[in-house]
Image (cartoon, rainbow, N blue to C red):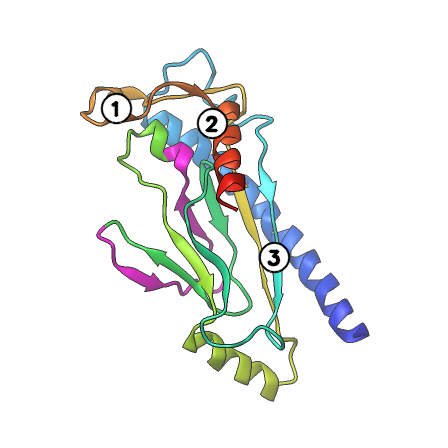
Amino acid sequence: MARDRDQLVDMAQVAVKDNRCEIDVTKDLHQGCFIMMMWNHVESQSDVGYMAPHLLSPTGNDLQWHGTLGTVFAGYHYDLNFLTIHGRSRFPGLNIWLRNGQKMEVKVPFGCLLIQNGKQLEWLTAGECLAGMHEVVVTNRTLEAIESARQQSRSLWRVSSTLFGHIASGATLKPVGHFADTPLASKYPPICAGDYVEQEVAAIIRKG
């Protein structure tokens, strides 16, 4: 137990270090996306992400007890935020769906991050950038990684480090730039980002 606890502390420290990089990436992506989309609101390009409710959310699952093929850690869903930045997990298991509906298991190379569109980005682009659907389950690749970890006497905790980048709660979500003139723009009416998050959370609670 002490060894596992020490390993979890080490992994948490690594997660904090990794997510300092992720926060920098989020800031750069916020600015880059809004420049490309010709942001014309009262809010400046940097303000829309400033003091936003960004969430760093490392998660852990003990595969020693929950390592059966098909075990679901996160069911099929999209993220309500602007951008989701996944660090490389210690064990595989993240599946994503491409725009054409194809399901694919993610393989994040060492030193790389996986960045997914969130619903807020979908709103700003009137559906041009759809929120990415994904899930986390125990797959055959997960089982192979579990066996390899056992042989090397490594911890069987699956730890992933995810940063959810948000638009500032007081900013207005609506199609921007040329996206405001697309046929689907009417499906994304103006709404305060904070109100939108409240609506999504309320819907999640009702479903739960």
Q: Is residue 58 left or right of residue 141?
A: right
Image x and y of residue 80, in percent? 46, 38
Q: Which residue in the rendered view is the most extreme toward the bottom?
A: 151
Residue toward you, 27 or 162 = 162
Q: Is residue 104 magenta?
A: yes
The residue that label 3 is drawn on is 59
Secondary structure under badge 2?
A: helix
Residue toward you, 139 or 108 = 139
The residue that label 2 is drawn on is 196
Magenta range: 100-121
Callout 3, which amino acid?
Thr
Foreground disc of the pair 1, 2: 2
Q: Is residue 112 visible?
A: no
State which quadrant residue 125 falls in: top left
The residue that label 1 is drawn on is 185
Q: Quadrant of the N terminus?
A: bottom right
In the image, what residue occupies the spot 28% across and 26% down?
A: 187
Image x and y of residue 50, in percent? 56, 26
Tell me which numbered mark, 3 or 1, is placed earlier along the sequence: 3
Q: Which residue in the rendered view is the most extreme toward the left?
A: 183
Secondary structure under badge 3?
A: strand
Callout 1, which amino acid?
Ala
Rounded to the nearest angstrom, the CA distance separating label 1 from label 2 is 16 Å
Query: How many neighbours does mark 1 have within 10 angstroms: few (below 14), some (14-19), or many (20 or more)?
Result: many
Q: Which residue in the rendered view is the most extreme toward the top?
A: 42
Q: Which mark, residue 197?
A: none
Rounded to the nearest angstrom, the CA distance separating label 3 from label 2 is 25 Å
Image x and y of residue 58, in percent? 61, 54
